[in-house]
Image (cartoon, rainbow, N blue to C red):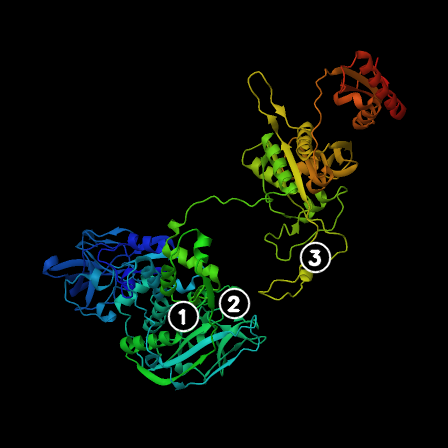
Amino acid sequence: MRVPLSWLRENVEMADGTSTDDVFASLVSVGFEEEEAIGFDVQGPIVVGQVVSFEVEPQKNGKLIRWCQVDVGEAHGGVRGIICGAQNFEQGDKIVATLPGAVLPGPFPIAARKTYGHTSDGMIASAKELGLGDDHDGIIRLSEWGLDPEVGTDAIALLGLDDVAVDVNVTPDRGYALSIRGLAREYALATGVSFEDPADRPASDVAAGDGFALAISDERPIRGNAGVKQFVVRTVDGVDPSRPTPPWMRSRLQLAGMRSLGLLIDITNYVMLELGNPIHGYDADRLSGGITVRRANAGEKLTTLDGAERALSDEDLLITDESGPIGLAGVMGGQTTELGDDTTNVVIEAAAFDSVSIARTARRHKLPSEASKRFERGVDPLVAHAAAQRVVDLMVELAGGTAGSIGTELAYEHDVVTIELPENFASELVGVDYAPERQQQILEQIGCAVVRTPSGFEATAPTWRPDLTDKWTLVEEIARVEGLEKIPSILPTPPSGRGYTREQSARRRIADVLAATGLVETVTFPFVGEKVNTLHGSASGEPAAAIRIANALDQTAPFLRRSLIPGLVATAHRNLARGTSDLSIFEIGSVFLPEEGVVYGTDFNLPRAVRPTDEQLAQIHAAIPPQPRYAGVLFAGDIAPKQPGRAAEAAGLSSALDAVRAIGEAAGVEIEVVQTQRAALHPGRAGALVVAGEHVGYVGELHPDVSNEADLFGRVTVAELDLDRVLALAGRRVTAAHLSSYTAATQDVSLVVGAATPAAEVRAALVEGAGELLESTRLVDDYRGQGLEEGQKSLTFALRFRAADRTLTAAEATDAKMAGVEVAAERFGAHIRD
């Protein structure tokens, strides 16, 4: 909201010399956000001049210029020669002359310049050049603006160019502050100065009259709330729309961010900015009968003031006459009854509409307006009379009209919110000792009617504050007015028994471990295309059940992901395109695994603004597909860069396996790897991840066709685990292993088996046969070549034995090793390599 300071001064006391910074500081202290100071950015000398004479001089380019003699007053050098390209003025006209040394918005400095064969000693200004509007078709003729000042008068003060505005951000819950009235009240709160309410007028002064036909027919109210809370109609007869908008009004509107659109419309906009109640004016001679406010019927259309024909919804609230719709209530009027250059009689509408209804209409038609912005935040339902009367007064004063005796009003009974506030509640909640007298004073200052009770206060919220609904909102007002800086900074002590759940702690621990081992965490969108969702969402690459989004952000990615890998692949592609070729990344996030044949996302037609029942909540949860949390990793490029004396180390399957082991250790489980196949992975370079006999994920190298299609060159390895299932299999408690103080015995064994025999299964046989003395088993070599028959391989395992109660002998370690070899021999025909 932009607030011209000259306008603000009309409603509050403001000391001489108060700057925009002072005003900003005051408004920020009561909860508003500072944006910027806005002025006309002009610098004098800019004065009133009078055209003494001019000569029209055609140019070779076909343009006509005028060589003018302009009297700017003795104090500014008398008559000066000025070149002007405009053709809309005559001899004797008083104009605005910008003299050498002046600066116009841009900045555009003015200097004496030789042009068109003359030295132009200044410039005759248009409204656009001074920042007073968009009119650049001709220069300002002061007589057309209703002015006849003396030659040489300072035009900056005359036209209000010395005014300045402050722009503050108004939060959605404080719609009353989208007005001079509201912000003046807030400035008074912050500074303690007196405030004069421009809407405070005796009822006899703002009576609407009668005789105008008005009907309200709201058969489809939204949430049971009538679309209209207040509707006042006033009339003004015999207006002259050709009269100019006075400079003070024009400059204030410009500073407030609104263009001058002609006197009648400017008056309605001016009152909206002043009192916060949007006003709409109708050409009375274009109305057919009276006004009816109703919901739209099927198939109805309306051409709004912006020239667009709009198909209406049955939720839209309309202003209609006997001819049909003439306006979208609270949003924008229609073309058929708009105020124009031939308007002589005006019907004025000042209303208060239901905020939800107006917000829905504005969004449905993508038609935000200054009116809808205010109505959807809440307009004071009791200000309509004063706003309508203010428009009448200005149209009589400035447009030469006569206040009509015909009018009408409709008012629904307004809910009065009375809130009980215990005396000590604010102090206990905020931590600041607020005296009861000060609390009452603040509540009265914000407009509440306050009654003391034995336990505290009963505060009745003012009609312009629909956000005041309970004792907590009253405390918020007390805190902000008294000063948020007075609230102490105290770190709260959390109650016992609170904190992360076991699963939350485990997920954070896993993320920390992966980051500590050199991977970078990414967060990707859960939206993917059908092809990659199918490829990575099932082992076979065959279509699987997936959730399609009804209104996707990106039509190429309308499905919820079944796997994290497509997001990681897309991230790798994006990084590679930007020159980052070595990648070690991971993500922990939800995937969406609907069951075949189950319909999700059913419309329950739940009541609005009411908490669902437990049964309804259960129904909602049942309609949501399973969303387990997965962990995914991806490696590409080098895992270690080239260094002096050391070649680069390429990322590969071992990198992904290391990440899997890190996840297992952080979760407290042992993850085994067994050979498998997946459509998206390279044949023979894919493994299933197993915990306690249950498959929980996979690891492997992307199929070359898959990585090439994503423009990822070289080997790309990935792994994905069902993290929720891993943590469930880990159990509730992790028991630390006993640390033996006895020396370990180490031995190696090389077993010859068939080339197709999985090494993991051979290792499992060794572990089973060796028994409890075997502490660890690690595959250190896989040899296939000279010395072995075709179709065979030699697997070398490093074995470590240890007893909990003694130092093992070499014979005991050998016996345990040979026991494991015997089991491997029985299962796979393994024998020790010679």
Q: Which residue is mark 1?
A: 278
Q: What residue did someone put label 2 on?
A: 356
Residue sitting nearer the eye, 142 or 259: 259
Residue at the image point whose x is 69% and y is 61% from the top? 615
How packed mark 1 is, by other alpha carbons closer than 10 Å (few <14, some 14-19, many 20 or more), is: many
Tell which of 213 and 94 is nearer to you: 213
Q: Work out how far the residue at label 2 is from the one at label 3, CA to CA, in angstroms.
A: 28 Å
Q: Nearer the viewer, mark 2 or mark 1?
A: 2
Q: Amino acid at mark 1?
A: Pro
Above or below 808: residue 609: below
- 830 lies left or right of 775: right
The image quadrant of residue 182 is bottom left
Q: Secondary structure at mark 3?
A: loop
In this rendering, the answer to whether 812 lies above or below 552 is: above
Image quadrant occupied by the N terminus:
bottom left
Query: From mark 3 to mark 1, how far is it between C-alphas?
Result: 44 Å
Relative to 744, 200 lies left or right: left
